[in-house]
Amino acid sequence: MALWLYLHFPQLQLDSLYHDRSLQQPTIIVAGRGHSVVQLNFEAHQAGIRLDMGLGAAAATCSSLCVHEYDKAQTAQRLVELAQWLYLSTAEIHLSGACGLLLKVSGMLTMYRDITEYWQTIQARLHVQNVCYHFSLGYSPLAAQLLAEAQFDMLCADRERLEYHLGRLPISALALPNKQLQGLVRVGIKSLQALLAIPMLELGKRFDTELVHYVGRLRGKLHHPVTFYQPPEVFERQLTLLYELENLDWVAKPLLKLLIQLEQFLKLRNKLTKSIQFTLVQRDCEALHLDIGSAEGEYRADKWQGLCLLVLERTQLAAPLQSIALSVTEFCEPDEIGSDLFSERCGTMTAAGLVAVLQAKLGTQAVQGIEPRPDARPELATSQCPPLTSRASSTASLRPTPMLRPNLLLPQILPLQQPVTLVHGPERICTGWWDGHEIERDYFIAQDGSKRWLWVFRDRLQHWYLHGVFS
Amino acid sequence: MLALLILIYNTVYVYSKVCVMANLIDFLQHQNLVWQGTENAPVSRQAYETVSTGFDDLDKQLRGGLPKQGVVDIQSQAGIGELRLLLPYLRGQTRMCAVIHPPAQLNAHALFHQGVDTGRFLVITPNSPQEALWAAEQCLKSGACDSVLLWHGDLEIHQVKRLQLAAQTGQGLICLLRSDIKQSASLPVCLSLKLMPHDLGLTVQITKRRGGWAKPDFILDMSSNWPELTSQSKASKSAQVVTIAQALQQANR
């Protein structure tokens, strides 16, 4: 049977509040509708506050009390951090509930000399993190958890001793619904020993399957579901330059070195990335952060280098360059190839690749897609959107009766300055009272002296403006 | 001795003949008048493949329509219908269409109502003419764009040649939309059109067409596509034609 180690962190949020123990004041963490105390520090305990006390009672007990609300997300985040920290020493870690870590020991014993050395390594790691914890070994995950939560805190791998201590636990320590606990107490089962003494078959006759399943898992007879923690993948490399660089043109070579490392990293994992971050460390100056994005996932170093050089063309250094760093935090899966295998390929890039190159050189703002929007106001009926994201084609079936609109709209409405002949109109657009951009305009199609087709309008004050050109 | 002299003379004569021949072939090749069974042949032939413009009259005049790839020079005043001339062509394309340095904001609403898929459009607003040409070349070379519309002023011959090569690589078409042109030298383009306003639509002058002769001007009737934007409708509904002064009078009454 596999040996498990359970680490129980009773006050994870409290531990992450302060790092300097000498400066602590009485602090409690409250949760639930009754704001009862769920975590409290030593000073609060000395002041007379106990667990499950209401907030009012706690405040009355101690005047200089510091109160925090229980934050589930923060606790979970902290637990993942601990798992990541322990992952350097032990391989199989399961995040159990909101405040426990389950470590599979048996696999790791081939790496460490014995269980004592293993535990010392883990203990040293936990000590640095400055957290309060209880621990226990166990031959099933559930047994280790129960003992750790009961603050067993002894490194004991002896099966009989563990069973003895487990048997001494009261029935109320079990994570079972109240109704079942009462049912057990009613038939005279008050400790775990009494429960474990009953054979499984007998138990099945008297109680429901849920309890049988629970006891089975506790004994290690039935499978306890565990999912082991996988650390997130990040790529971070730094390259210190042999001498300071003043010209960005010379960065290309060291840059390529980093990008080739990235290529190998991604290739091994069969991943692509859509954005990379460069940090250029300058002498006596703030480091320069550059985000380089590509609309399609890419791993090849030469493609990324092309994009980087385009971005660097637009960048100016404030001081000589001392080192460069590359980090990639987000990865994506390679897409299935959607194009036809037999259709003739022409050109060198895909649409997304082209957009990436254009945006790298000209800036993101200079390359945009356009999108019609359901608004009667002409200046709001068309909007810019990130390229290749417009959804116009999907709404083609809902096309209303065609309206005649100019192909080119002036970015700003201009007062009409030349004499024109009105050919068509008026078309009144009077809307927008709901969002503070109200218009009331009569639109005309007009032709000016040089036979250009213009879209002009007259507002409520009889002023004439030019808005578009029927190009 | 004499035999040797004759031999030398003959050698020199033959050599000079060969030189002249080589020059001639070079010259003819340069003029695109010699067909060779080399690997370049399909590409050079494709240059004559055409795509319909969507206007039957214009297709007839252009012997099939716009070239499938290459550079088309359109000289016109802004706002007389130069973009509408290209719209039926753009509607039929499947790859992207890059619009570089338009004189005003491209109206997605108008394109939507004329049945053009706006999702394929890429609007590029470069900071300088050099960047505009760079962007046009990238778009053409990528093969991701069917067509590139570039608003630009005067162009050098070498710039157009570069665009032509890029268009061949990516099999795309670039339309140079130019107004107020000062230069008179002809550019190495596949097709050059000059547009003038006309009551029925446009007067089109084909100033240059590769593999064809210059033709007299002709009138492109756009009244079926955009009846409101031709002055023909003016004749039928003459009552609606009002000047600003009249309109103001009516409004004040």
Image (cartoon, coloured by chain):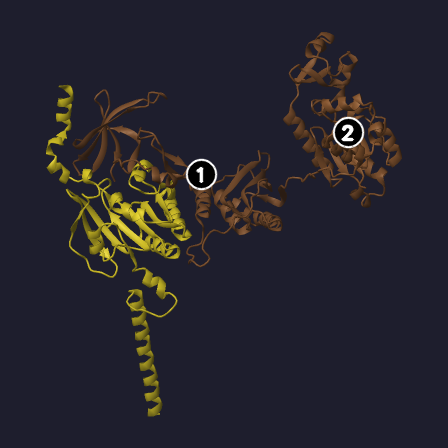
The spot of residue B89 in percent (x, y) is 29, 49
Colour of chain A, in one word, is brown
* Three-letter code, disc 2: Arg
Q: Is residue B146 above or below residue B103?
A: below
Between discs 2 and 1, the one toward the N terminus: 2
On residue A364, the disc is: 1
Q: Residues within 10 Å of mark 1 (few under 14, many from 20)?
A: some
- Numbered marks: total: 2
Work out which quarter of the rendered image holds the N terminus of chain A and state it.
top right
Q: Are marks 2 and 1 in contact (CB under 8 Å)?
A: no
On residue A206, the disc is: 2
The spot of residue A346 in percent (x, y) is 41, 56
Residue at position x 45%, y 46% in the image? A352
Q: Are marks 2 and 1 on the same chain?
A: yes
Colour of chain B, in one word, is yellow
Q: Element type at marker 1?
A: loop
The spot of residue A426 in percent (x, y) is 20, 28
Query: Which chain does tag 2 point to?
Result: A
**Image quadrant in which you'd find residue B178:** top left
**Image quadrant in which you'd find residue A425:** top left
Residue at position x 82%, y 34% in the image? A199
On residue A127, the disc is: none
C-alpha gap between disc 2 and disc 1? 70 Å
